[in-house]
Amino acid sequence: METKPLFILLCSGEHEKLQMAAMLASVAAVSERPVEVFVSMNAVLGFAKDAPAAERYHGGAFSKLLTEKRAPDPMALFRQGRELGSLKLWACSMALDVLGWELDRLEDDMFDGALGLTRFLSDAENGQFITL
Amino acid sequence: MADQVLDAKGLNCPLPILRAKKALKDVPVGGTLQVIATDPGAVKDFEAFCRTTGNDLVESKADGKVFEFLIKRTS
């Protein structure tokens, strides 16, 4: 059975969507399904290096529950996915440019580099595409 | 007697699967990992995990709200 690689376009800065992206990516990766995540728009802010959780994660009712019940941190889930499977994260070069940030403003050992949409879309042609 | 035992009780999705993947790295090929979990989704999750990774789900049983899985590492 051939499994299509998973391509996740993560744009939202909402805690709930960051959490879902991290869960999707890490589970797919450990299920031996290659995953790539393109992080853009508000989502980039969730990956700011050394930002405390309270600054990183904003959302609705569910965000509060995730925090209260100490759900696994999205950054930790992404890292586990990278350690245990094929999981690549790309920072949107346009978003970095608009923010005036370099990759080193983002979490260490998380990103494989900065990328543009053209390349991401082209790589995703034979995969399954999810937008969060 | 399993080569490794993973106590995943109290952990919710996706942690049992992530921890199992990590624990399997220390199981020799042909060896087994026993996982104990309370996550209600675990039964179907572990069936799917073994299917996609090609590992053998040798045993899956439930005792009330506690589930036990025996996974054989195949590669």
Image (tube, rainbow, N blue to C red):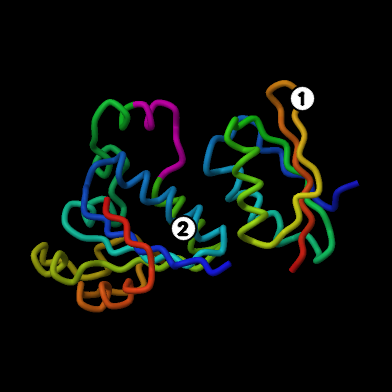
Residue assigned mark 1: B63
Is A67 left or right of A41, judged from the image as shown? right
In the rendered image, residue A72 lying in the magenta stretch gets the answer yes
According to the picture, the residue beneath numbered tag 2 turns out to be: A79
Mark 1 Cα shell of 10 Å, populated few (<14), some (14-19), many (≥20): few
**Mark 1 belongs to which amino acid?**
Asp
In this rendered view, identify the residue nearer to me: A32 or A14. A32
Q: Residue at x 62, y 38 (%)?
A: B42
Q: Amino acid at mark 2?
A: Arg
Q: Position of residue A28 (x, y in %)?
A: 49, 57
Q: Nearer the viewer, residue B45 or A96?
A: B45
Dividing the picture into quarters, in which one does residue A70 lie?
top left
Return the chain for callout 2. A
For mark 2, give the secondary structure: helix
Tags 2 and 1 touching, CB below 8 Å = no
> Residue pushed farthest left?
A98
Q: Which residues are magenta?
A: A65-73
On screen, residue B26 versus residue A103, left or right, reads: right
Compared to residue B29, the image places residue B8 above or below, namely above
Disc 2 packing (10 Å; few <14; some 14–19; many ≥20):
some
Nearer to us: label 2 or label 1: 1
Alpha-carbon span between mark 2 and mark 1:
33 Å
